[in-house]
Image (spheres, rainbow, N blue to C red):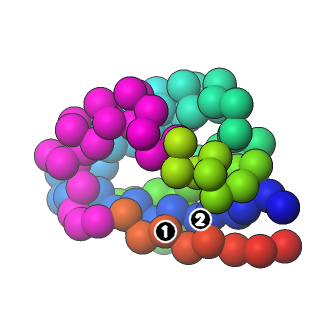
Amino acid sequence: MPLGVFAIITARPGAEAELRNGLYNLVVKVREEDACLLYELFESAEHPEKFIMHELWTDEAGLQAHDQMPHMKAFGEKATNWLAGPVELIKVEK
């Protein structure tokens, strides 16, 4: 059964543009992953520091493999300067 995820990502004050660019670059790479069925980035209209990633994975194993991808690790290293705190993951079922 596919696994849905919403990731709530909050930028550190002043780092919104860098985080936005990093996320848009990441989307292109993640969509090439075998387990990725959907990976869409949204920006909050009310809170410019908030980004929401809507994800759909083949299963939990696919999501776990995603976390280990080289592009995710590279993004994580850069994002430490951009993020206000940990990314909030919300897993959902259809």
User: What label does residue 2 carry, if any?
Assistant: none
Asked if residue 73 is among those painted magenta in the image, a careful observer would answer yes
The number of callouts visible is 2
Give the SS element for disc 1.
Answer: strand
Residue 91 in sight here: yes
Residue name at image x 77 percent, y 74 percent: 93
Label 2: which secondary element: strand
Q: Residue at x 62, y 72 (%)?
A: 91
Give the image location of residue 76, x and y in percent: 28, 42
Q: Is residue 20 left or right of residue 16?
A: right
Point out the residue furthest to the front here: 61
Residue numbers of the magenta segment: 66-86
* Quarter assignment of residue 21: top left
Could you tell me the amino acid type at mark 2? Phe
Q: Is residue 72 left or right of residue 82?
A: right
Between the C-alphas of marks 2 and 1, the distance is: 6 Å
Label 1 is placed on what type of residue?
Leu
Q: Quadrant of the C terminus?
A: bottom right
User: How many other residues sit within 10 Å of disc 2, few (<14), some (14-19) or many (≥20)?
Assistant: some
Of residues 75 and 65, which is closer to you in this image?
A: 65
Reply yes or no: does residue 71 show up in magenta. yes
Q: Which mark is residue 89?
A: 1
Residue for badge 2: 6
* Residue 79, percent from left and from top: 25, 44
**Contact, CB < 8 Å: mark 2 with mark 1?**
yes
Residue drawn where x is 47% and y is 57% of the image:
51
Kindly indicate the quadrant of the structure image that contains residue 34.
top right
